[in-house]
């Protein structure tokens, strides 16, 4: 029995084979709906989705950016550069895509149905029993299964069943993000902006800061650094996706979403004039708190397992949250493929947990690191960072970079990682 999420798809299919039970995905939503904006599908995820047969479902919706440009907040000058095409296909055997979240969700849903997975809506789980294992729905209905995979997000109910430490589920990072899209036709109309659409690419403007940090604060009473803006096209090139990260440690329940647009424009006042013009085109935006999950020592209790954001929520600064969740699903499916019947589930879960906790922890740490690297105040650290990225912008060789998309060692462990192969290795080591 499975909760809904992108990470449950492959595991659902494999569960049918290893347990002889039909997989069932439960979602609390009243209908399978398409929500959200942009999402990135890096090479460590695309290789797994391709093996799952998602290529024809994704083909018409994905965009393959040619490069990632890091830009100076005030001028838009390029300070860092990662070449995605053809580099990532050649080095890691898989492309790097961006997509509208709604299209990604739809593709996964269609593929799940084609694999014979049943999706049941309006089925909110309120309690888990690890002994059955069994669940209780909000309407009082109960159901049992050979195994339960809970991918119920940051506000996970299942996490409390698995983790008895009493620790907070996540840590406030002091950051929030405005998320928005702009119709690309409006950008094409402006000669000063249309260059952004000449080639598919990700552009990241880094860190506003005022010269005198001791005396000057922003319109909201905070020091004006620690900001960045990420942009790329989605929806088969129809929409310009924007994520505008900024410091905010206030309680989200106090936020007035009606003021989001005016607040956002003030937050990024004085940035690259071209970026400000695009921000001015935004007609609607939502503000989200950015959190990082507290690392857990276990994801399993009996035959109940958590994964995805329920197990390892992370900052979006490596753009790996969804990718690591896809890895979870593929790794779980691979581990289940090693057993012959339901009696082997505990071992399959144990090996999965051992491999995935380590991997997710590394990605959480890398995401937190980018939160530091991207947000240096203007000064020695910022200047050293920019100087270290300079070789990649002019085609010179380099052995390391504070741009983790370009850094050779980070690339290897991040994008070269194969979740299924890591499970294979762990199973081999477990054999007597």
Image: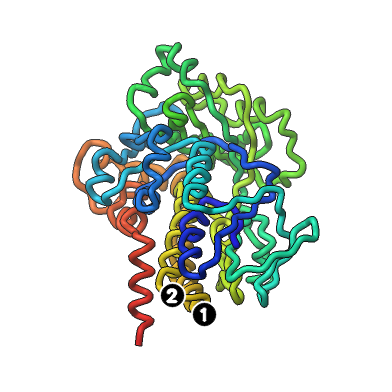
Q: Position of residue 138 (x, y in %)?
A: 78, 56
Q: Is residue 430 left or right of residue 259?
A: left
Q: Is residue 131 left or right of residue 351?
A: right
Query: Circle 1 is placed at which residue position?
Result: 343
Classify mark 1: helix, strand or loop: helix
Q: Quadrant of the N terminus?
A: bottom right
Image quadrant where residue 302 sits: bottom right
Taking depth in this image into account, of 250 and 188 the one nearest to the observer is 188
State the residue lying farthest toward the bottom: 432
In this rendering, the answer to whether 305 lies above or below 210 is: below
Numbered-mark total: 2
Q: Is residue 402 visible?
A: no
Classify mark 2: helix, strand or loop: loop
Q: Position of residue 411 (x, y in %)?
A: 32, 53
- Find the distance from the CA under tag 2 to the CA under tag 1: 8 Å
Disc 2 and disc 1 in contact, CB within 8 angstroms: yes
Taking depth in this image into account, of 159 and 77 the one nearest to the observer is 159
Q: Is residue 405 left or right of residue 205?
A: left
Q: Which mark identifies residue 339? A: 2
In this rendering, the answer to whether 205 lies above or below 190 is: below
- Please tell me which residue is depicted at 36% across the width and 29% down the height of the picture: 200
Q: Quadrant of the C terminus?
A: bottom left
Q: Position of residue 337 (x, y in %)?
A: 41, 68
């Amino acid at each position: 029995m499975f909760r809904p999420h992108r990470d449950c798809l492959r595991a659902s299919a494999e569960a049918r084979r290893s347990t002889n039970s039909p997989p069932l995905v439960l979602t609390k939503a009243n209908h399978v709906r398409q929500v959200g904006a942009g999402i990135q599908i890096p090479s460590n995820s695309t290789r797994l989705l391709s093996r799952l047969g998602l290529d024809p479902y994704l083909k018409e919706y994905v965009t393959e950016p040619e490069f990632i440009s890091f830009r100076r907040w005030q001028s838009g000058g390029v300070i860092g550069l990662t070449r995605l095409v053809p580099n990532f296909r050649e080095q890691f055997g898989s492309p790097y895509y961006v997509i509208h979240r709604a299209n990604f969700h739809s593709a996964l849903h269609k593929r799940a149905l084609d694999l014979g997975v049943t999706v049941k809506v309006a089925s909110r789980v309120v309690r888990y029993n690890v002994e059955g294992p069994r669940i209780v729905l909000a309407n009082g209905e109960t159901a049992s299964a050979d195994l339960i995979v809970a991918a119920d997000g940051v506000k996970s109910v299942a996490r409390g069943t698995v983790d008895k430490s009493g620790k907070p589920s996540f840590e406030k990072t002091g950051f929030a993000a405005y998320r928005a899209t702009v119709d690309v036709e409006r950008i094409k109309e402006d000669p000063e902006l249309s260059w952004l659409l000449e080639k598919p690419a990700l552009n990241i403007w880094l860190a506003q800061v005022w010269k005198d940090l001791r005396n000057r604060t922003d319109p909201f009473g905070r020091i004006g650094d620690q900001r960045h803006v990420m942009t790329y096209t989605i929806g088969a090139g129809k929409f310009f996706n924007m994520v505008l990260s900024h410091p905010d440690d206030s309680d989200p329940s106090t936020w007035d979403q009606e003021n989001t647009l005016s607040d956002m424009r003030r937050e990024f006042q004085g940035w690259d004039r071209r970026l400000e013009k695009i921000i001015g085109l935004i007609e609607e935006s939502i503000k989200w708190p950015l959190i990082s999950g507290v690392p857990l020592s276990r994801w399993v209790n009996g035959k109940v397992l958590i994964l995805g954001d329920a197990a390892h929520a992370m900052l979006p600064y490596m753009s790996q949250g969804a990718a690591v969740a896809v890895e979870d699903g593929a790794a779980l499916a691979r581990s289940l493929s090693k057993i012959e019947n339901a009696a082997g589930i505990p071992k399959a879960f144990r090996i999965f947990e051992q491999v995935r906790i380590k991997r997710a922890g590394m990605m959480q740490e890398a995401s937190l690191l980018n939160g530091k690297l991207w947000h240096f105040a203007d000064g020695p650290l910022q200047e050293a960072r920019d100087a270290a990225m300079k070789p990649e912008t002019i085609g010179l060789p380099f052995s390391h970079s504070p741009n983790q998309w370009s850094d050779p060692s980070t690339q290897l462990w991040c994008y070269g990682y194969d979740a299924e192969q890591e499970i294979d290795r762990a199973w081999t080591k477990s054999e007597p």
